[in-house]
């Protein structure tokens, strides 16, 4: 795979180049904020660390959806399946006139702090309904965190939500039915904790050729997942023209871990991880004919 520091173009990921790279050792764990009854702790903890991947993703996902759905079902709303969807944040940004900064302010406000979870759900239903875009996308959510899924469904962010862990179990009949309609599978956080098993179980459900867009931390490798996608006829490219800040490091040890892991992966940390943030790379997987019809460089040009 061509290193980003050596190329200003997109590059195709070859399964034969797979290598093992440690991906989670040394990272700060935030397990206690991902399955709360509501997202207030999530935004309270990640706000000071400037977590921002969903902000980068919303415009890209919108353009990718328009391209992959152009000739598929033009009379139907596009369907996106968001892996590790958490509290439905990608759906919130994609389908509503809100920014990630708006959500940080909303969920850490004195008004939100004073509410019970039940009251917050009612408040959020009205909040999102008032900001709904006229061109919403059908978003299906998948996450092992049952509370997060329940919240996202309760406030209307997800059309359907599934609290399932495809690393340890096969997809339920309901998830298999829902996944058949997906034109785009997305993930903005979680690839570090997933194996090809999750993607294999989803792709066997897909009825039409599906696209997969993933923001992947530079501390790890996407090669084994790309190989799985290739076995389903999908060509994986990465955007080698840029990276996207994910969040600030929680401390010096975490930063050193990231610098060492990125270097071990053959990438250049200078100006990115050395400046205090994890960075992600965008990978887009599609049938080869779609990749040739809609060049990744063109899709990213307006983002």
Image: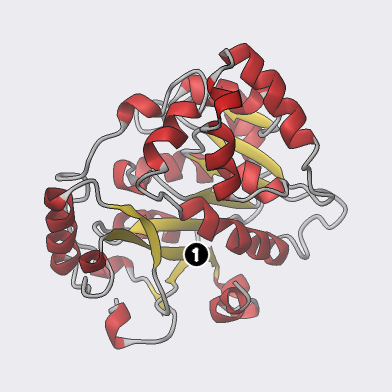
**In which quadrant is the N terminus drawn?**
bottom left
Q: Position of residue 259 (x, y in %)?
A: 16, 63
Can you identify the residue that label 1 sits on? Answer: 284
Question: In the shown orientation, is residue 130 left or right of residue 228?
Answer: right
Q: Residue at x 44, y 25 (%)?
A: 145
Regarding residue 81, the answer to whether it shows in the image is no
Q: Is residue 42 visible?
A: yes
Q: Residue furthest right?
A: 75
Asked whether, in this view, residue 32 is left or right of residue 158, the answer is left
Q: Residues within 10 Å of mark 1 (few under 14, many from 20)?
A: many
Q: Residue at x 71, y 19 (%)?
A: 122
Pick whichever, 190 or 242, lies toward us.
Answer: 242
- Asked if 301 appears above or below 126 in the picture, the reply is below
Give x and y (percent) for residue 199.
44, 45
Which quadrant of the rendered structure holds the C terminus?
bottom right
Task: Provide residue 245's location: percent of width, then percent of height.
Answer: 38, 61
The answer to whether 161 appears left or right of 251 in the picture is: right
Q: Is 175 above or below relative to 211?
A: above
Identity of the residue drawn at 77% across and 47% down: 136
């Amino acid at each position: 795979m061509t290193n980003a520091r050596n190329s200003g173009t997109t590059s195709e990921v070859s399964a034969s180049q797979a290598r093992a790279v440690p991906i989670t050792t040394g990272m700060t764990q935030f397990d206690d904020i991902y399955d709360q009854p509501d997202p207030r702790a999530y935004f309270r903890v990640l706000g000071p660390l400037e977590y921002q991947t969903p902000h980068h993703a919303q415009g890209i996902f919108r353009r990718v959806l328009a391209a992959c759905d152009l000739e598929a079902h033009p009379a139907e709303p596009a369907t996106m399946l968001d892996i590790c969807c958490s509290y439905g944040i990608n759906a919130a940004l994609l389908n509503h006139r809100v920014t990630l900064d708006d959500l940080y302010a909303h969920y850490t406000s004195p008004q939100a702090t004073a509410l019970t979870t039940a009251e917050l759900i009612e408040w959020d239903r009205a909040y999102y309904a008032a900001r709904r875009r006229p061109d919403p996308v059908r978003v299906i959510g998948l996450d092992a965190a049952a509370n997060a899924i329940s919240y996202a469904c309760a406030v209307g962010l997800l059309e359907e939500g599934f609290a399932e862990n495809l690393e340890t179990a096969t997809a339920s009949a309901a998830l298999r039915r829902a996944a058949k309609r997906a034109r785009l599978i997305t993930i903005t956080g979680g690839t570090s904790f997933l194996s090809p098993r999750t993607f294999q179980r989803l792709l066997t459900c897909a009825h039409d050729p599906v696209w997969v867009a993933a923001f992947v931390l530079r501390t790890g490798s996407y090669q084994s997942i790309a190989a799985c996608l290739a076995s389903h006829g999908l060509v994986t490219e990465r955007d080698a023209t840029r990276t996207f800040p994910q969040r600030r490091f929680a401390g010096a040890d975490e930063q050193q871990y990231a610098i060492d892991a990125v270097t071990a992966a053959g990438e250049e940390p200078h100006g990115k991880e050395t400046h205090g943030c994890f960075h992600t790379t965008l990978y887009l997987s599609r049938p080869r004919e779609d990749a040739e019809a809609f060049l990744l460089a063109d899709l990213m040009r307006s983002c």
